[in-house]
Image: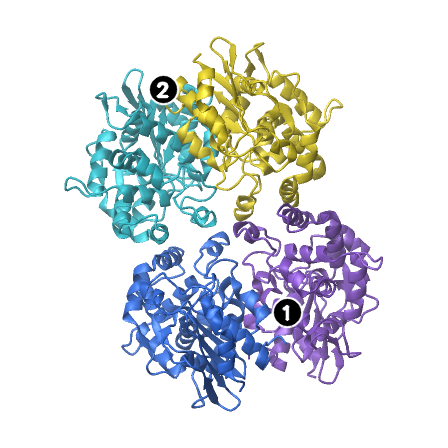
Chain colours: A purple, B blue, C yellow, D cyan
């Protein structure tokens, strides 16, 4: 493995650019000057990591990957595909424009908010566990992180400020895309966004995706090969919202971001990558994180289109 | 190589589905019951092909790849990137909605019509050759097809019916995205769409892209590595218009389609693929062509996200 | 007064065209073959009416006029004008497109759903009366109809099916246009839509507007002259949603419609008109009602642009 | 008549606000500090006017009224109505959004650019006169202004900078709304916008509209009553673009504006009004002109909704 600390150091000054998310207090008070990376190498089955890669932060939109995978696991690939498209959007992650202009009968993809609320709504109570309890247990397992847990303060704030998500959810309900109770689904959705992870947990998640759905640390399959392949494709085409095409052309690594400052990448058959740096660009992506990922992609020749 | 004729046979009945393009006479009178495929294998540097892979047909939108590559070659990577985005659109290939709604100052990507007209407009006369003469010569070389030529009848019809493209071009000019004479650029654009190729020419083009920009048949570099990688990424995220995400998730092979019935794919470091079958689905993509490409991707394990 | 019964008879067959509203049971079971009209003549201070002009039906969107007038009365003209625009929309009454595309910070006007929810939200509890209790009392007075009351079944259904209104309300809240509790405002909004009126009540309401804000039956001012003038203008430019321009050019009478089959018009200084006929065209306007209104406008030369 | 000079004086300082149109040199060099008004009083058949009411300026969008009236005269009311709607738009006068989002098959109204280009295209050569020659002769007659003529420099500039209009025209042609030669229609359109008028000419035009289509100075009918009524309605609902609803609610007088600084109003059966003041607000309407019109409407009680 190349020298990750050195790569981290050379990108650290980028943490001065951008701003941490400020829409809720628990995110607004996070220090901007943080950068950590963890890389799971499938070749030798080893995890490499730097300073600050064990700091906990809010998973936010990266949880959409976990929920998508769990919805496929519980409800089947076809059911999920019938209920949400895999198309891109030219608009913001929380926009209703495409849905209304094109008279869509499905959310555009699982990574815009409308689509993520939809996949969350597909998860049903099971074995006396609520949807969120199941998601949490699944997240702990696929991230190889038993300490991964809900941050109640963040959840409370997400719920309190989540009016645009409520607007989207009721739009879906009004158009019969969601049949169930919207309030419950939103509650689960806000909770899943409020789980706390580390760069290491995300590298593990990326490693499972990169490893065709098999956890490399115990060699057990947790998701189907098809789900893993499908999700990596979606991360490439829609993982960074309407900037996805830009980063696909620039970095070429399937990646999902979250406004907590996380980036999670899966390089097929090679690496899982987790990065944390909370200062965001105007599109809500980690500035130093993307800088570091670009350098890593160049250094390890990760661009899958190369 | 697997048995291509057999794969072709098993998809041939799909040519009964869909309809050939009908907006101009020269396309409308093409027989629907045609299907041909050619695959350039980089491993042994050999081209495999089936019946009907030498039939000539209109390149249409696949020419956007050629013009993009030539514009990068002539004007440089940065100049092209400064003038056209690499973002996806949630709308049709000839829509103005994203541009106007988002107040964009660049066309969204080189594969929607507005973006393709833009890249065409970047190409300047050189060595006493018009932009189209240069494009044609470059196309002959990169497709390894000296017989590749302009179909005057198709060009005449494209020009006659191209009012939506004129509308887009004047929109770009009104917003100062294009400075030059719009009439000339449109003329070049309609001509490039009216070149005639075969499945074999497209397999060769795909092979150059797959081979990092080096023509495998003579081992000479014709485009930069960066241009090749960039273009494969764009083919994945926007090559099949607003259905790009759908096919990325389903097939996972960088591909560009044209309403003449062509499909051109580039599997990094492995294969160039050319397919011809003129009957189109409602999105303008070849029905039997996509069926055959899906089977080929499964058989040869081409999904780059797997 | 011209022979209203004769005018009614000649338009009665139009009740066979269109369909009664079907989104809630209480509206779906209303008989289509009904048509009634009442005209309040300010010249001689007399009300003329036909058969079926005393049938009760749901006021639906015509309540938006009442709430607007009451909001102005309680909160002042400027406060209401600061919170909702008087612009037209090219889209459906329940669309979010203009708001999001144009980044509006106010609903477009008080007669699209978003704007009506906004005006409703402006009304505050007062003298120990809830907003709805105040609206109801005001409606009874301005319609000169002490029997005007809430239909609990309709309210229940409106509330149950009102997800698009919830979506709009949370959009307004998310963008800080509404500060208060959205659930309460929606409840009041659904209630105001569920009041039952007659063609006579609507003719009285129209007469107050036509009479510059003074109730002609007791010569007492109930709303300001400015509010009356302002509201008649709005009825002309936005009273029939995005078809307002069409009917302004065709009929030329300030009118507000509701999907319960009501039409309410105010001809400045001349007439108040109330019509009921529940069969609707595709835009949600009463078919026979508009036929009858057109004939009446021609017969009495009501077009204010003539 | 009230003291027009006094009203003019009290609004003159408003000419300091806003900016003159700057997209072409001939408009950019007009002095901002100008304000003139003319009022044609139908009661006594007299024209009242102030200083600067005889200054010539470019008619620009007010020509859309003249062309609409002439198209109705030449082609009939129904033909014009079949080809262009009377609906409002929530967007800018030169936007394509409504057309494309709603899949409209007609321009929204005759006063957005797309609709005006359409009405212009309806006018056919006749009696060996080109469409523009007919429009000019009609304009001279209906404005009672034999000196009204084309400004070649303005025409040349309009033509040179009119790319957004070309974009709209080709969109209409691509969707079969216009069948004829677009280049000719655009040329006529740019010419009609480049005619020069005075506040007096516009007051005369307004007087004909106010007088039901009869020229009050010679008592001869020049347009049908229906055309006059229809046009006044359109001026009210769409005459000031997407701000029409705002001014309808604020002033209540059917008015059409132009970026040359003109305003033309028609108060049914009472007055024709022409105003000139070239400094424009951000919506392209004359600042001092609207101030003066508001004061005049208050003073003479012109609000037709009052």
The vertical placement of C288 against D89, above or below, is above
Chain that bears disc 2: D
Does A179 sit left or right of D95 as displayed? right
Residue hosting label 2: D3
Q: Position of residue C150 (x, y in %)?
A: 68, 25
Q: Residues within 10 Å of mark 2 (few under 14, many from 20)?
A: few
Q: Residue C224: horizontal and vertical position, in percent?
A: 56, 19
Q: Nearer the viewer, residue B5 or C60?
A: B5
- Choose top left, top right, bottom left or bottom right for residue B168: bottom left
Q: Residue B262 in the image: x percent, y percent?
A: 43, 72
Furthest residue in direction top, as rendered: C44
Q: Quadrant of residue A78?
A: bottom right
Depicted D94 relative to depicted C256: above or below: below
Residue A271 location (% of width, % of height): 68, 78
Viewer can see residue A253: yes
Per the image, label 1 sits on a secondary structure element best described as: helix
Disc sitting over residue A230 in the figure: 1
Relative to C221, does residue C150 appear above or below in the rendering?
A: below
Q: Report whether A277 appears left or right of D92.
A: right
At 31% across and 19% down in the image, what residue appears? Answer: D42
């Amino acid at each position: 493995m190349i020298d990750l600390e050195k790569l981290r150091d050379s990108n650290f000054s980028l943490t001065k650019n951008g701003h941490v998310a400020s829409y809720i207090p628990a995110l607004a008070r996070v220090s901007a000057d943080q950068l950590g990376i963890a890389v799971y190498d499938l070749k030798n089955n080893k995890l490499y990591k730097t300073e600050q890669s064990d700091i906990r932060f809010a998973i936010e939109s990266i949880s959409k990957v976990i929920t998508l995978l769990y919805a496929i696991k519980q409800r089947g690939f076809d059911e999920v595909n019938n209920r949400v498209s895999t198309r891109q959007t030219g608009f913001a992650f929380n926009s209703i424009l495409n849905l209304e202009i094109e008279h869509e009968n499905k959310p555009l993809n699982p990574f815009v908010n409308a689509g993520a609320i939809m996949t969350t709504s597909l998860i049903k109570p099971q074995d006396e566990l609520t949807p969120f309890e199941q998601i949490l247990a699944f997240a702990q397992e696929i991230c190889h992180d038993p300490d991964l847990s809900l941050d109640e303060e963040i959840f409370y704030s997400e719920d309190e400020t989540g009016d645009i998500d409520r607007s989207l959810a009721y739009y879906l309900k009004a158009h019969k895309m969601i049949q169930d109770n919207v309030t419950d689904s939103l509650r689960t959705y806000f909770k899943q966004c409020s789980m706390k992870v580390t760069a290491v947990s995300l590298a593990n998640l990326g490693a499972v995706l990169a490893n065709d759905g098999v956890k490399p640390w115990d060699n057990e399959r947790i998701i189907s090969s098809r789900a893993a392949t499908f999700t990596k494709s979606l991360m490439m085409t829609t993982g960074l919202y309407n900037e996805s095409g830009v980063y696909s052309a620039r970095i070429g690594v399937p990646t999902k971001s979250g406004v907590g400052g996380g980036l999670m990448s899966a390089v097929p058959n090679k690496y899982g990558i987790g990065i944390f740096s909370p200062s965001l660009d105007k599109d809500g992506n980690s500035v130093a994180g993307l800088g570091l990922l670009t350098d890593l992609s160049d250094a390890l020749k990760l661009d899958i289109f190369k």
